[in-house]
Every structure is written in C-alpha cells, then in structure tokens.
Amino acid sequence: MASDKKKLNIFLNDLLKLGCVKGFQYFATHLRGREEMVVSVINEPSLPILLSATNSPAASFASKDPGSVFISQKRQRRLSGYGFINVGLPPASPSGSEDDEENCTLFLLAGYARYSCPYVWVRTNHDRIVRLSSEDCPERDYPLALKTTSQWQHTDVCVVDVVAELVRICTVPCPPNPFAVDMDYFAALPASERILASAAMISLLQQILSTGSHSYDRRVAADLGRVGQAHFQALLEVVQTESPQRPSSLNQSTISS
C-alpha cells in the first residue's frame, strides 16, 4: 500500500539521520546502505549507574526462551507473505558475518522494502539476549520480537524508539537515558569537526524531544544544552583562529598596491 511505503520511507530517512550521528555513550551506529544500520550496544558500561542489574530490562529479557524472544517461524511466514514457499523474515546477510566486539552486542536494524516493516536481528553475542540450544540454531537469524517493531502496524514507531529499546534490553545496568551523550568524544575533536558533529547531535536530540513524551526527556534536554555550548564554543574557536589572518592579508594587498 502507498501509505505503508510512505511510512517506511520516513523511517528509512530517520535511519540515515541517526546513522550519521556520533558521540553516544551506550551505542554507536554504522550505516549499510539505505535499508540497513548496524547498532553496536555496550553490554556493561564502566560508568556507575545506580540501578540494580537484576531489575533491569536486560536481565528479564535474557531470561526468556527463544520462543518468546524471537518472532516464531510460523508468524514470520505469515508476515513475509512468502509462507507458501516456507520463507520467513531472514536478514539480507546471515548471522556471523560480523566480528565480535569486546563488551558490545551488534544488532542489525533494517527496513527492507520487501517486508514493508522494520525488524531487528541479533548479530553477535546471542547468548546475552537468549539461550540457544546450539551454535548453528536457525533461530539465530530470526528477528527479535521487540515491543517497538511489533507496534509498527498500529502506531508511529521512530528509529530512536527502536534503538532505545535495544539499549534497555542489552546494557546492564539499564541506563536512565539511552541517548546519553559522550562529551569527551566532542572535546577530543578539532574545532572544525566539532562544529559539524555537534550540529548533527543537536538536530537529533531536538527530534527525540519532539517525538512524544519519554522518561529520559529531562536528561536529553540537559545534554542538548551541553552539546549546544560545545557547538558555539567550537564556532568561536574557528572564528578566533581565522580572524587574525584577515587584516594581515588586507595590509599585504595594500602594500603591494
């Protein structure tokens, strides 16, 4: 349907936007073309968070059996529209194509046109999310039964909502703000690069605050203020670096004339 295609295109545009933003504490993104984005989520951050790991969403999610964590094969065949040839919802590339990252779990977030709906597949550290019976279990390439993607047909689901759920089910202890900004990342950038990186982050944080009410909005707003300060400080540094050169060039041209 045209409405489904339009909805998916909006999602993919937001996927591209988020994939270009760097500087988060608990996750990083890597775009794979227009339809795919790899999300690398930190398992156990070194920063102390005052929340019991046993009460976190990650602990409860990982304790479930595969049947409740993954979308069942029967339902996949129904959703894919290819059940008559026994095809479910496989990703474009099979699990195992990515290398394990220390203290991180990789997820593939994709909005394939042939499915008309976004899905998420675990790419590494499956045991952290679900208990599987064997290494070559076909369930490794089943999409996750996330709350966000399951609600796709009934409500507006944003890319940031899906990523927030991934952080909450993977990172232990569960962070109060899945989009916490790593200010050290911006401080380490040259001023010219900091201007662009901070501008991208500002735009995304503003988008998060405009897409409904979240429990972490106050923290996002606080980070927005800090990134804004870093942005204007970088602008000031660039202006101060370039401004002394302008009078000297003018004086040189005056002398030459």
Image: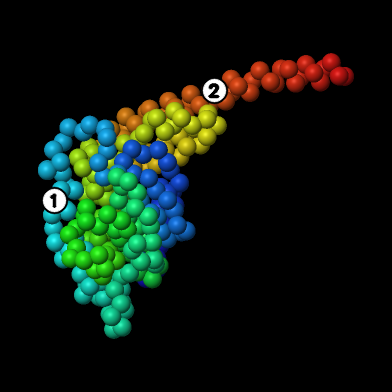
Q: Secondary structure at mark 2?
A: helix
Q: Is residue 71 among the parts visible in the rendering?
A: no
Q: Along the polypeptide, which appears first: circle 1 or circle 2? A: 1
**Disc 1 versus disc 2: nearer the observer:** 1
For the point 82% across and 17% down, which residue is it? 254
For the point 37% across and 43% down, which residue is it? 207
230 or 215: nearer the viewer = 230
Which residue type does callout 2 highlight? Glu
Left or right: 199 with respect to 166?
right
Q: For mark 2, does the 10 Å Cα neighbourhood hold few (<14), some (14 to 19), or many (20 or more) residues?
A: few
Quarter of the image for residue 22 reads: top left
**Residue 250, placed above or below residue 147:** above
Q: Secondary structure at mark 1?
A: helix
**Dot label at residue 112:** none
Give the percent coordinates (x, y) of residue 249: 75, 21
Contact between labelled residues 2 and 1, with CB atoms less than 8 Å apart: no
Residue named by callout 2 = 237
Classify the position of the C terminus by image quarter: top right
Residue named by callout 1 = 60
Give the percent coordinates (x, y) of residue 197: 47, 37
Which residue type does callout 1 highlight? Ser
119 or 61: nearer the viewer = 61
Q: For mark 1, does the 10 Å Cα neighbourhood hold few (<14), some (14 to 19), or many (20 or more) residues?
A: few
- Disc count in the image? 2
For the point 37% across and 55% down, which residue is it? 99
